[in-house]
Image: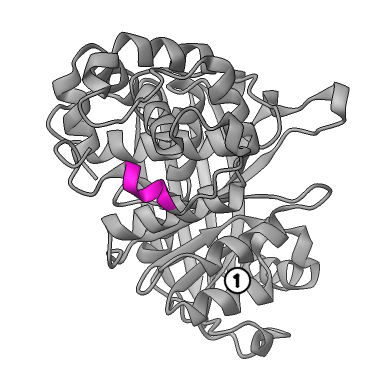
Amino acid sequence: MNAINPLSIRENFETITDPRVERTKLHKLGDILTIAICAVICGADEWVEIELFGKSKKDWLSGFLELPYGIPSHDTFGRVFAMIEPDDFRACFLNWVKTLFEELPAQVVPIDGKTLRRSHDKSSGKSAIHMVSAWASSNGIVLGQVKTAEKSNEITAIPELLKHLELKGCTVTIDAMGCQKEIASQIVKKEADYALALKGNQAGLHSDVKLFFDDARESGFKGIPHSFHENVDGGHGRVEIRRCWAVDEIDWLCGKEKWEKLKTIAMIESERHIDDKISKETRFYISSHGADALKIADVVRSHWAIENSLHWILDVSFQEDSSRIRKGNASENFAVIRHMALNLLKSENSCKLGIKAKRRKAGWNTDYLAKVLAAA
């Protein structure tokens, strides 16, 4: 594999414990995992398609894989991925990302969750899995992911994800579910900043901040030091106006001292004009940044990149929400494979195509697939 990918994706999997009993280890684990990644890059979204890719590209794959018994069957792929311990698989993914970026450039890192809707299994009582991911908004890659535990939520998953991320100099953004004192403290200990959305889960804090801004707006912010920024854009009959107010004189805020490095409260108003209809939405935030309305507005706007640049692409280009993969640990492990494939496709910049088109090109042209693998 080194002739194609100098960092060797195959070697990255060597730390994974092979879950198979000895008598069933006909195919090398590294071969199985590498074929799966190559196949998903090239447009495969299920086990049968992965087997078909392997058989179609057997001569090419034989150039860097052992393949002692040829290409594994789709049942073998499904069985192995269902058995692999997800913590091992995620650890390999995290190590791989750290190899790509020894030090992550300062940028906004949104953290958000996504439910894999078809991963539930009524017959076994298995609910759909919910993955919480961290996204590097400037690099355009997934930094890591953690599945929320059964009968739990993102509050328990986010600290586990943060534990494994290198975030020095970055700004972490999380929606209201992750607005927790312990999470803010953990981010600061990572030498990062935060911008956390406020809603009812922090009822007292949300109420105090909302009341403050309601009174401030009514008086036109008279006598209240603040920063303000407004941005207008639109097209095709749609105009959006975004306004941000930021205030850092908040010694009056009850419980402020319990939030590590809390410096600023902010209000963002989005006003949308679509044809003759006008809608408004107001959101509130706390941040460890100073009262720079332009910066906070940009940070908050960058948060939504995880929806458009990750979740939407996983659904549209990788058919994640339609995937029926669900046996054992397979759905969770396959989600990590998708993230790895997406990172490689995003990192390959020789052609300006969308992810769906890049997947097709890689499937049609092994020279281009080699370029994608070498993007690591």
Q: Is residue 311 above or below residue 75?
A: below
- The picture places residue 347, in percent across and down from the top left corner, at 24, 41
In magenta, the rendered stretch is: 10-14
Main SS of the magenta part reads helix
Residue 249 visible, this orientation: yes
- In-front residue for pair 103/203: 103
Determine which quarter of the picture holds residue 23: top right
Q: Secondary structure at mark 1?
A: helix
> Which amino acid type is marked by label 1?
Ala
Q: Is residue 274 above or below residue 15?
A: above
- The picture places residue 367, in percent across and down from the top left corner, at 14, 22
Residue 84 lies left or right of residue 254; in this view the side is left
Residue visible at 17% across and 36% down? 4
Residue visible at 44% across and 30% down? 32
- The picture places residue 49, in percent across and down from the top left corner, at 46, 12
Residue picked out by circle 1: 216
Residue visible at 62% across and 60% down? 158
Residue 42 lies left or right of residue 113; in this view the side is left
Name the image quarter holding the N terminus. top left
Residue 162 lies left or right of residue 82; in this view the side is left
Q: How is the protein colored in the picture?
A: one colour
Mark 1: few/some/many CA within 10 Å (<14, 14-19, 20+): some
- The picture places residue 302, in percent across and down from the top left corner, at 41, 51
